[in-house]
Amino acid sequence: MTKIILGGSMLEELQEKYKLKADDDPIVPVDLISRQDGKKLYLSVSSDELSNKLQEGAIALGESQFSKFKNTTVVSKDGEKLGRIIERILHSDNKLSFILGDSPLKEFAERIGLTPDVDLLVPNHYIDGYKGESLQLSVGREDLVTTLGAHSLSIGRAAERIHFSEMVSKDAAISRYTYR
């Protein structure tokens, strides 16, 4: 991941959704993030220096937004279905990983504590490309760690990562941050 699109207020995002306002959300290259504190990002430039989604070339031809990958099925190098992308994590070193979850019903059972919340963590560099409708990995299940594994990231407890949440509201699936 090289960039983050900063969403506006819920009202602004609704106006953009219904074309009452231009969808000119600012784009932040991750190398301009100087630090992160909770849900605040501190940038090494002012907001006036950022490009926005409407500017030509701001999102390059080969780049994709996360919303296109969410819920995509992921398969191992052996063709085993491993799960679907439910979340992404930007680590403190600006490296990206994805969390693979199960069906919405199983994820709900995990959320309310009926079953253990054990998902697979997939570093971005393990993604080999698309194979039909699925993302193909260059590794097998045995090469991945779980979100509860001894050497893996402790989801929900790691202070050194930026956790992007898609659950801002029913209609807005945008990562929101305060930036200065």
Image (tube, rainbow, N blue to C red):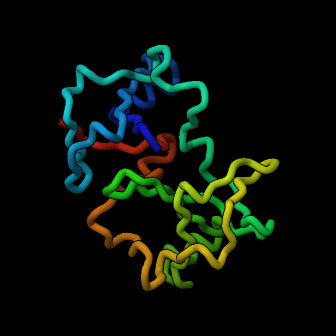
Q: Position of residue 174 (x, y in %)?
A: 44, 42
The image quadrant of residue 33 is top left
Which residue lies at the image location 33% right of the left edge and 60% below the top edge? 161
> Does any portion of residue 2 appear in the rendered image?
yes
Above or below, 174 relative to 86: above
Above or below, 165 relative to 99: above
Q: Residue 173 vs residue 47: left or right?
A: right
Q: Quadrant of the C terminus?
A: top left
Which residue lies at the image location 75% right of the left edge and 67% below the top edge? 81
Q: Position of residue 31 (x, y in %)?
A: 32, 40
**Residue at the top extreme, as displayed:** 56
Count of numbered circles on the image:
0
Q: Position of residue 95 (x, y in %)?
A: 42, 54
Above or below, 158 relative to 129: below
Q: Which one is nearer the viewer's eye here, 107 or 137?
A: 137
Which residue lies at the image location 49% right of the left edge and 58% below the top edge? 97
Q: Position of residue 114 (x, y in %)?
A: 54, 84
Which residue lies at the image location 23% right of the left edge and 20% below the top edge? 48
Above or below, 71 relative to 111: above
Q: Residue 2 vs residue 76: left or right?
A: left
The image quadrant of residue 79 is bottom right
> Does any portion of residue 108 appear in the rendered image?
no
Q: Which one is nearer the viewer's eye here, 85 or 92?
A: 92
Q: Which one is nearer the viewer's eye here, 18 or 7?
A: 7
